[in-house]
Amino acid sequence: MSRKKLVRFQENDENPNVIQAGKPIFETIKGNWNEVQFQNSNPIVVELACGRGEFTVGLARNFPNLNFIGVDIKGSRIWKGSSTATKEGIQNVAFLRTQIELLEKYFAPDEISELWITFPDPFPRDGDEKRRLTSPRFLDMYKPMLKKDGCLHFKTDNTDLFNYSLELFLSREDLEVIGFTHDFYQSEWKDDHFGIQTRYEKMFSDKGEKIKYLKCRFS
Ligand SMILES: C[S@@+](CC[C@H](N)C(=O)[O-])C[C@H]1O[C@@H](n2cnc3c(N)ncnc32)[C@H](O)[C@@H]1O
């Protein structure tokens, strides 16, 4: 492992805004995010596959009265968001380092007010459908964690993943698709994300890919 990575991992260990294996809080945080981590009762917004956390930190700057949690398995990526939040003194941000497959170990029913899935890996092979973060098994897991009427937002550059997800979401009786677009920056929502672009969003937008977005909720 490179020295840079080691330093980042050590900083994650020391930074209270990173919740990960090896810290006692990692085992007890489920149902206790507000009381233990944020020490307030503000609504919780979770970003899955947050990568370097640009979106989580960007939203936290804009909404000091909401709590934001970015989830990703890669410690060196989480480090970026975590250290940015620390440098700027942003208190309403935390990062959870885990496989998203294990999310129900960390969130109690109704603990999340809003869920974002931003530019997840597309897993294009048929045999990998179960690994897509918008596949049925993940939706079934997210459903109880989200408060009633809590929105699930999904953003991607990948047309196949978007169409797969849209078709699936529209076919589910327990999901209401509130709206969707195959070209976010030409859509009515273009100003709703406060100009915050994730690293992957910027990378694909710069290559001329249209950004797809959908918003839905469980009924
Ligand atoms: C394509 S990157 C997108 C990162 C960020 N959302 C962005 O837009 O820049 C996908 C991210 O998802 C994370 N990831 C993929 N599958 C995961 C899983 N099952 N559990 C946790 N993280 C996962 C990867 O580590 C990676 O950081």
Image: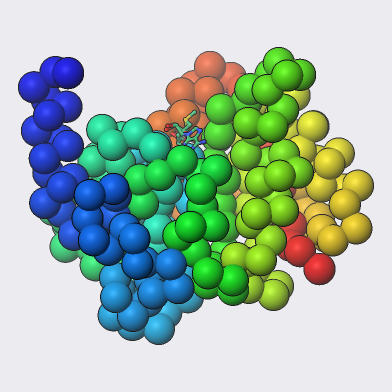
Please state the total of marks drawn on the protein image.
0
Residue 181 appears in view: no
- Relative to 208, residue 116 above or below: below
- Relative to 158, residue 134 above or below: below
Which quarter of the figure is the C terminus placed in?
bottom right
Which quarter of the figure is the N terminus placed in?
top left
Say which of 55 and 10 sits in front.
10
Residue beneath the point at 39% across and 74% down: 32
Q: Position of residue 29 (x, y in %)?
A: 36, 66
What colour scheme was applied to this rendering of the protein? rainbow
Is 15 positioned to the left or the right of 109 in the image?
left
- Relative to 97, residue 36 above or below: below
Is 146 positioned to the left or the right of 104 in the image?
right
Is 77 positioned to the left or the right of 168 in the image?
left
Residue 110 appears in view: yes
Which residue of the protein is positioned furthest toward the bottom in this rendering? 41
Residue beneath the point at 72% across and 53% down: 140
Q: Position of residue 115 (x, y in %)?
A: 57, 57
Residue beneath the point at 16% across and 27% down: 5
Residue beneath the point at 56% across and 34% down: 120
Q: Position of residue 191 (x, y in %)?
A: 56, 53
Say which of 108 and 150 sits in front.
108
Q: Position of residue 158 (x, y in %)?
A: 66, 25
